Amino acid sequence: MRIFAREALLPDGWARDVAFELGPDGTIADVQRGAPPGGDVVDGPVVPGMPNLHSHAFQRAMAGAAERRGASGDDFWGWREAMYRLAATLDPDALRTIAREVYRAMLAAGYTAVAEFHYLHRDPRGAWYADKAETSRALIAAAKDAGIAICLLPALYAHADAGGAPLHARQQRFATTPDDVLEIAGALRRDHAGDPDVVVGACAHSLRAVTPDELRALVAGSPPTVPVHLHAAEQTREVEAVRAALGAPPVAWLLANYDVGPRWCLVHATHMDDAERDALARTGAIAGLCPTTEANLGDGVFPLAPYLAAGGRIGIGSDSNVSISAVEELRWLEYGQRLTKRRRIVAASSTGQSCGETLYAHAARGGAQACGIRAGALAVGHRADLLVLDDRAEPLAGAPPEELLDRYVFATNRAAPRHVMVGGRWRVRDGNPSP
Ligand code: NGQ
Ligand code: ZN
């Protein structure tokens, strides 16, 4: 299959008259600039699809339902109680239905892959389903229904807080040992061996939810190349709990105890001191940033400029799915910085560099790395995960290509690409799901 675009964003910038030859495996086999039109001529500028590196799909069912003032101190931990009440109501069918709609919305909003951070393993009363992988399978099925690539992350969740505190009653659904999650992940990997649209990673909920020994068993028992994800340093209370139990804050502790490198994704990593920030940046690991959820939950602001200056890699996630929009995540990422630093153009560092394009390129590449897929750039050997932007109307109409992603990130009020391709297959055509 050949697709032809008048304008496409290649790794070294915008190119004209680009022909992509796609292989039968859904990857890009060849890219030609200045090519003659032919094949599937797309009607708009082409950019890489955006991986969504962090989602709890089920939480979409409470979007907007926890925005009323409570009797005392509305904070992250109070929101979490509402989230636990929701989690207790969902069976595997409900999970699949919600996730399917969420994944369709992600595709429509420019996400072409999702890392689903999954911990609703048991039934609502805390008993195992006959198949321990039942709810994980429901999520993979939802991704298949929708046509999005998925990195399923079955999370190890064994304790209520750092120091090995026992799980609360309302966390019993999440209760897992390292052997449980290795068994689930192993079964899924066997079932989806050779499927380019399903990756199964290794995942611990957080340093609150596992002991050092449990984390060690999980990482040691997982294949050495799969992505490793965990929540880290999102709330200051969490940082203090980890410091008290382990003698160091989460990021410093991880760096001291693991060979943290490109397969690691530290979700949030909001609260770091300067040394942690620069050390994390040097590892090649991904900081998984979820700006709309982090804002919604009152987490704090990630130190973006010095982290990027130190060579740090980032990706974006929709996390609680209170918002499902790649554009909104990128815009909030930059605007949070501008508001707190009282300056402009934070993510771009060199003179003349586009802020929107820089954010987009960082997040696309970093997101793909965190999802364990070769994507995030339109290059030979990469997945054909791409968007055709809608340049028929403002704000994209008439834009020179160099300005397109600045207009897309900062000026669109509906992040809706015209067409979306995942692994060489059109999944959205003219804004609608494509069967
Ligand atoms: C989660 N979400 O597991 O869904 C968490 C909240 C927790 C975010 N951190 C619960 N955004 O961290 O304990
Ligand atoms: Zn999360």
Image: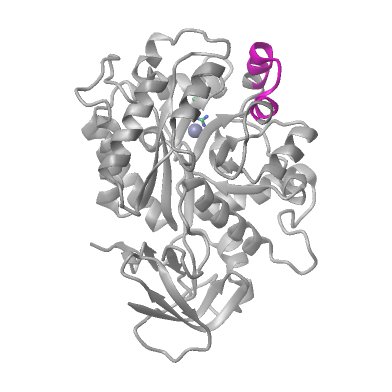
Residue 109 is left or right of residue 96, and the answer is right
Task: Using the image, determine if residue 261 lies above or below residue 176.
Answer: below
Which colour style is shown? one colour
Direction from residue 285 to residue 131 in the image, left or right: left
Residue range of the region highlighted in magenta in the rendering:
239-254
| Relative height, residue 316 to residue 386 (above, below) | above
Q: Which x, y percent locates residue 313?
A: 64, 49
Q: Quadrant of the N terminus?
A: bottom left
- Residue shown at the point (60%, 53%) measured from the top left: 331
How many discs appear?
Answer: 0
Q: Is residue 215 something that shows in the picture?
A: yes
The quarter of the picture where residue 171 lies is top left
Placement of the C terminus among the 4 image quadrants: bottom left
Q: In front: 352, or 166?
A: 166
Magenta highlight: main SS: helix
x, y percent for residue 177: 40, 18
Q: Which residue: 54% across, 56% down?
A: 364
